[in-house]
């Protein structure tokens, strides 16, 4: 999917609308909506990455009664199969816990609540300055995680074109195309792009990566796939 195609994709438009919504929601509404949006993105990502040969099995697993029917189970599954790094898993669970606090305790109605404020300050995916409000950390981490999950979904090999067991004819056609000089250059360029992407993902997942470097990487990713 090209940048232009993604900008016209309903997911991108929903992402932009959600970013605006975060600023006007109450603290409780912000926490509940954020968790719901992230939960939906995780489901979409898992549907892209997991085995596609048995749709019924996949649907059953992602049903609310299934093995991956909850926000918590989807977070852990995405981590255990290597889709998201530990830092994303930890932050998603903090967001989930924040959602649960707001959802289960009516007396809790602010991000300034001591326990919730502490969780917000622990969010690795918040790129904001340490002294900003807990809600500012929460909103920034949610936005960055949403962008990250949507990015992972976009770059996943499309299920209609993915062929885990190519035929002999497919292999021959691939070899013939690879003999062309132009295609050889395309393959080389794609390999370089994948290598750079893998290195960027490794740096984003590494807590030791300086904030300035993480900011640079996310800015480049947004410029490439989200239009800046």
Image (cartoon, helix red, strand yellow):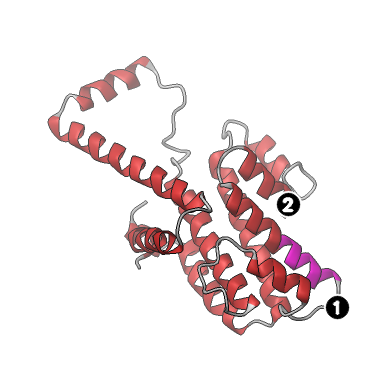
Disc 2 is placed on an element classified as helix
Q: Position of residue 151 (x, y in %)?
A: 46, 54
Residue visible at 53% across and 53% down? 207
Residue hosting label 2: 72
Residue 69 included in the magenta stretch of the image? no
64 relative to 142 in the view: left or right: right
User: In the rendered view, would you say 49 is above or below 15?
Assistant: above
Q: Which mark is residue 46?
A: none
90 sits left or right of 82 in the view = right
Image height check: is 223 above or below 117? above
What is the distance, in whole Å, between disc 2 and disc 1 at their CAs?
22 Å
Quadrant assignment, res 51: top right
Give the residues drawn in magenta, as a range.
96-104
Residue 75 vertical position relative to residue 97 in the rendered view, above or below: above
Q: Which residue is pictured at 17% across the width and 24% down the height?
A: 179
Q: Position of residue 63 (x, y in %)?
A: 73, 47
The residue drawn where x is 77% and y is 75% is 114
Q: Is residue 97 magenta?
A: yes
Quadrant of the drawing holding the C terminus: bottom left
Magenta segment's dominant SS is: helix
Crowd band around label 2 with a 10 angstrom C-alpha radius: few (<14), some (14–19), many (20+) = some
- Residue position marked by numbered label 1 in the rendering: 106
Identify whether 29 is placed above or below 45: below
Q: Position of residue 218 (x, y in %)?
A: 41, 61
Marks 2 and 1: CB-CB under 8 Å?
A: no
The quarter holding residue 123 reads bottom right
Please state if 51 lies on the left or on the right of 56 as rendered. Answer: left
> For the residue carrying disc 1, how many other residues have a C-alpha within 10 Å: few (<14), some (14-19), or many (20+)?
few
Q: Compare residues 86 and 25 and report the one nearer the observer.
A: 86
Image quarter for residue 56? top right
């Amino acid at each position: 999917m090209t940048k232009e195609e993604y900008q016209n994709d309903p997911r991108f438009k929903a992402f932009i609308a959600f970013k605006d919504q975060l600023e006007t929601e109450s603290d409780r509404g912000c926490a509940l909506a954020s968790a719901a949006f992230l939960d939906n993105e995780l489901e979409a990502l898992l549907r892209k990455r997991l085995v596609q040969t048995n749709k019924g099995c996949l649907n059953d697993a992602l049903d609310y009664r299934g093995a991956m029917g909850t926000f918590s189970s989807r977070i852990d599954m995405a981590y255990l199969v290597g889709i998201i790094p530990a830092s994303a898993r930890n932050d998603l669970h903090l967001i989930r816990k924040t959602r649960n606090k707001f959802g289960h305790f009516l007396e809790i109605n602010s991000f300034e609540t001591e326990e919730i404020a502490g969780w917000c300050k622990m969010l690795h995916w918040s790129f904001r300055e340490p002294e900003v409000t807990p809600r500012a950390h929460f909103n920034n981490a949610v936005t960055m995680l949403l962008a990250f999950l949507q990015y992972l979904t976009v770059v996943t090999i499309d299920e209609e074109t993915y062929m885990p067991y190519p035929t002999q004819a497919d292999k021959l056609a691939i070899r013939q195309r690879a003999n062309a000089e132009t295609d050889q250059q395309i393959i080389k360029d794609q390999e370089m792009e994948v290598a750079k992407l893998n290195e960027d993902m490794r740096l984003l997942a590494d807590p030791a990566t300086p904030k300035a470097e993480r900011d640079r990487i996310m800015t480049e990713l947004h410029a490439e796939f989200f239009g800046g």
